[in-house]
């Protein structure tokens, strides 16, 4: 009888454990959810350290018409390919009353090229004309649902997301771009017009999350 | 006349020997005669057709990688091992998302890792490619997707994975 009870208990526990783990192993593994269009910018009052040494918040960086956030890094070939378009977009954003900041979320690569000093060197070497700040422990990236570098988030004056995705449709060549998504979005935002393409996707380097 | 015939026979036999040795040596040559046996350009639409062609025959593990992508390189040998483990019931479909100027580098990497089946090189528009492979993929590399023999997506994820994670989901895809 005791053996029967033990066997029943064992089977019951097995079924419960299997059901528990089964329930938490979905067919599609959920990815970090990207901010939805219309969502408010998170962590706007949190200070991040710019390569100049200055501590800034997203609220402080934003202009009268909004804020452009670029998740970027030093160690991604996709960033290298698009990097020639960083300054022109930052300038266009400024002309349209939009502030620009690039955030480096690669917490696991701080000792492999994405450290603060590496960022300072990169900003100097490439002549960045915008803020380039450290996203400590990838906290901003997590809050934004950023997944890769480069990954773009554009907010309006109410700090609501109006465009998310790629800079344009051609990493390899600025001359051969057919869809200048971000440029169009910045111009429309500056002019107070509706943005026609609100999201886009591009290949990029996965964010190196802290372990 | 007799001598000529004997030489012709010997040459024919030798030619047959070379032909069979070559085809045995490189299985992928049989699978893909019209292009590079290891790395073939593929558009989003073509890839969709290739994946679907295994429905009812094998489970499929799709992996998008690039030579410049450190997490991709880390997990690559694990995926090759998975293909060896489930040789008859699983087809690994590697797609290199390298830039066109790194095609040779990608090819050399495949050879260095003893990949001996046809793999693919992404061609065409990135966004279309991403959306064709999965609605849930944002574009970050590496990307993996496991599909059962019945064509059902069992799992998909961005970022790298361990052998045990691949193995776990492949087992689910194969109902093991």
Image (spheres, rainbow, N blue to C red):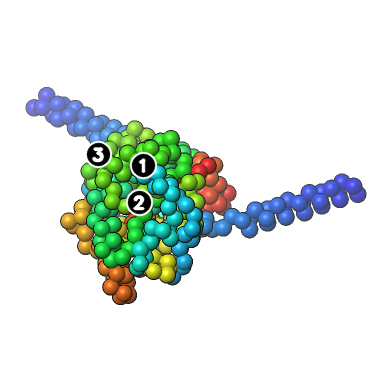
Q: In this view, does B46 lie above or below B65?
A: below
CA neighbours of label 1 inside 10 A, class few (<14), some (14 to 19), many (20+): many
Provide residue A171's location: percent of width, then percent of height.
Answer: 26, 53
| Viewer-side residue, A132 vs A110 | A132
For residue A119, the mark is 1
| Viewer-side residue, B114 vs A156 | A156
| Viewer-side residue, B105 vs B173 | B105
Q: What element carries label 1?
A: helix
Q: What element carries label 2?
A: strand
Q: Is residue A95 above or below residue B146?
A: below
For residue A169, side relative to residue B141 (left or right): left
Q: What element carries label 3?
A: helix
Residue A67, by quadrant, is bottom left
Please say whether residue A64 is visible from this viewpoint. Answer: yes
For residue B104, the mark is 3
CA neighbours of label 3 inside 10 A, class few (<14), some (14 to 19), many (20+): few
Task: Tell if the residue under mark 1 belongs to the same chain as the one under mark 3.
Answer: no
Residue under label 2: A131
Which residue lies at the image location 42% right of the left edge and 66% below the top edge? A159
Most distant residue in the top direction: B3
Label 1 to label 3: alpha-carbon separation: 31 Å
Residue B87, by quadrant, is top left
Label 3 to label 2: alpha-carbon separation: 37 Å
């Amino acid at each position: 009888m005791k053996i029967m009870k033990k066997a029943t208990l064992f089977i019951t526990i097995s079924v419960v454990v299997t059901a528990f783990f089964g329930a938490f192993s979905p067919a599609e593994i959920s990815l970090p959810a990207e901010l939805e269009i219309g969502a408010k910018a998170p962590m706007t009052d949190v200070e991040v350290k710019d390569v100049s040494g200055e501590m800034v918040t997203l609220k402080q960086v934003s202009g009268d018409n909004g804020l452009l956030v670029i998740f970027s890094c030093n160690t991604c070939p996709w960033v290298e390919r698009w990097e020639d378009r960083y300054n022109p977009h930052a300038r266009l954003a400024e002309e349209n009353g939009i502030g620009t900041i690039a955030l480096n979320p690669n917490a696991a690569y701080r000792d492999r090229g994405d450290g603060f000093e590496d960022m300072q060197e990169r900003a100097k070497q490439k002549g960045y004309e915008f803020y380039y700040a450290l996203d400590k422990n990838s906290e901003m990236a997590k809050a934004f649902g950023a997944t890769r570098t480069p990954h773009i988030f554009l907010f309006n004056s109410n700090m609501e997301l109006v465009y998310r995705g790629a800079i344009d449709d051609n990493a390899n060549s600025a001359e051969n771009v057919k869809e200048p998504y971000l440029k169009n979005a910045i111009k429309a935002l500056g002019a107070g017009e509706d943005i026609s393409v609100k999201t886009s996707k591009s290949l990029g380097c996965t964010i190196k999350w802290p372990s | 006349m007799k001598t000529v015939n004997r030489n012709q026979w010997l040459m024919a036999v030798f030619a047959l020997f070379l032909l069979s040795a070559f085809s045995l040596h490189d299985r992928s040559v049989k699978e893909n005669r019209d292009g590079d046996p290891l790395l073939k350009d593929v558009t989003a639409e073509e890839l969709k057709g290739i994946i679907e062609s295994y429905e009812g025959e094998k489970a499929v593990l799709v992996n998008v990688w690039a030579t410049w992508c450190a997490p991709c390189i880390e997990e690559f040998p694990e995926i090759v091992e998975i293909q060896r483990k489930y040789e008859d019931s699983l087809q690994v479909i590697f797609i290199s998302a390298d830039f066109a100027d790194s095609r040779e580098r990608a090819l050399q990497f495949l050879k260095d890792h003893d990949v001996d089946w046809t793999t693919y090189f992404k061609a065409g528009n990135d966004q279309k490619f991403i959306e064709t492979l999965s609605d849930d993929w944002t574009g970050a590399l590496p990307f993996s997707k496991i599909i059962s023999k019945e064509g059902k997506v069992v799992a998909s994820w961005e970022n790298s994975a361990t052998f045990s994670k691949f193995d776990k989901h492949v087992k689910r895809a194969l109902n093991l």
